[in-house]
Amino acid sequence: MPNKDEITAAIQAIEPFKQSDELFKSRMAAHARVLSVEKGQVLFVNQDEADKIYIVLSGWVKLFRETLDGTQAVIDIIPKNHMFGETSIFEDCIYPYSAEATETSELISLPISLLKDGIETDPKLALAMLSSMAKYRKQQDREIEHRTIQNASQRIGCFLLRLIDQDQQGPVSIHLPYDKTLVASRLGMQPETFSRALKKLKDATGIDVKGATIHMDDVQQLVRYSCAACSAEFPCKDLKASAY
Amino acid sequence: MPNKDEITAAIQAIEPFKQSDELFKSRMAAHARVLSVEKGQVLFVNQDEADKIYIVLSGWVKLFRETLDGTQAVIDIIPKNHMFGETSIFEDCIYPYSAEATETSELISLPISLLKDGIETDPKLALAMLSSMAKYRKQQDREIEHRTIQNASQRIGCFLLRLIDQDQQGPVSIHLPYDKTLVASRLGMQPETFSRALKKLKDATGIDVKGATIHMDDVQQLVRYSCAACSAEFPCKDLKASAY
């Protein structure tokens, strides 16, 4: 269980809160609740009334929407030190997606009303929220671009590049942050498509895949293959800004 | 050539500017420049330094990015009474895409520095920009969802539904707002994929396609087909908020 200082540090570490005033952060910390959730536990459902925002302290939370027949579209997988639920402020306080822990996770919940008040009274916080929203918008733009231009193997290559220190020279080993089925759904692929595309990526680039560990002698193997079908150049700012 | 009142009205009509203070709007109007551009004219290129934002008065402007080998990803097609270029404020004033008129168009350009000053000094404008950014983010979320769940024909159906007054009963005729090649690239499809998918949509729903005009006896023909593969229900708020 995190103590008060750790909770304050977690709030302070959220990008748009960094520049906000101290009073706002101490009010947030005072109203923070810590939650331990099991794998599969649902935090809220798409279209629920939004009264809280969440910060992930450990584990992973999947944001998704479902059609009537149960087909799922994964919107994002939120890692630790990131927030979710905050955009509902601009959606009449209705969550625009469902949230489910994909493994045992520890979270902080904060009253959404405090963030709302903060944005209305602290121009610095409003600007920081705008800037963070613009960054996310750019990432989504890039995602839509990739779904247009890149094939499935190139998209997996791009996903792997996000997990690497981009200035790294020589051999690199990557561990997938969560299981392959979840990586597939994060990338909007059926598990079979993902397996086939991963095999094709191996054949095309010579990377070595053993379970959840991927090894390559040189990052350029992936860069040449994936970044050719992207309008950005490697190393790219969008990857660095990415949530993974 | 629009007169001063028409320019002021166009600025006033941009969603996030509606609630901003009068001084800001009159400064914007005083610095507005009207541009007439030909089909194919490029306004700026991805990664150019951003000094202006634009409002479309008539015509259409395509936002896109290109890979080194010239493959294009269309990000959006901006219709009249909508703005573009404004998110570069949060990208160190670098345009995150290229912009090209897809037909003869009339535009207003405004100095980006005025919008920047406005956001920093007028909390109402900052909030309105946040809200508009959140709306766009939700539409992108939906777009990514559709590219995951819907097949090409369902996505064309969804595109057509955006062009309709959703409360309409009985027979409906739709005219495509721009040519089919552009609709295809807006939807991230190759022209051949688009043609095949449109034919499949015709066969599955019984809609009638003649050139750029589409006719159906009842909107439900499309709703049953496309909205089954979407987490939102028809009539949906996202469609109503859409730029088309």
Image (spheres, coloured by chain):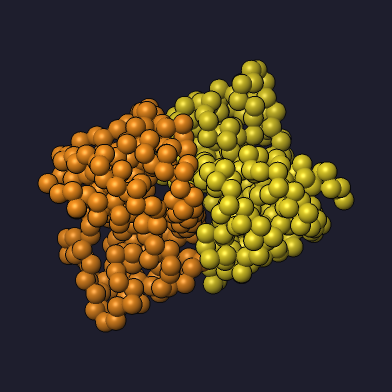
Chain colours: A orange, B yellow
User: Is A80 situated left or right of B175 in this image?
Assistant: left
Q: Residue at x 26, y 39 (%)?
A: A31
Choose between A124 and A54: the one closer to the eye.
A124
User: How many numbered badges does the structure rendering display?
Assistant: 0
Residue B14 position, x and y percent, is 67, 43
Choose between B169 and A31: the one closer to the eye.
A31
Q: Quadrant of the C terminus of chain B?
A: top right
Furthest toward the left, the residue is A1
Q: Residue at x 20, y 36 (%)?
A: A41
Q: Quadrant of residue A174?
A: bottom left
Furthest toward the top, the residue is B170
Q: Is residue A144 visible?
A: no
Residue B136 position, x and y percent, is 53, 44
Residue B97 position, x and y percent, is 58, 61
Furthest toward the bottom, the residue is A170
Q: Is residue A34 visible?
A: yes
Q: Residue at x 60, y 25 (%)?
A: B166
Position of B72 relative to B154 (above/below):
below
Choose between B167 and B224: the one closer to the eye.
B167
Choose between B62 and B56: the one closer to the eye.
B56
Residue B233 position, x and y percent, is 47, 27
Q: Residue at x 68, y 49 (%)?
A: B24
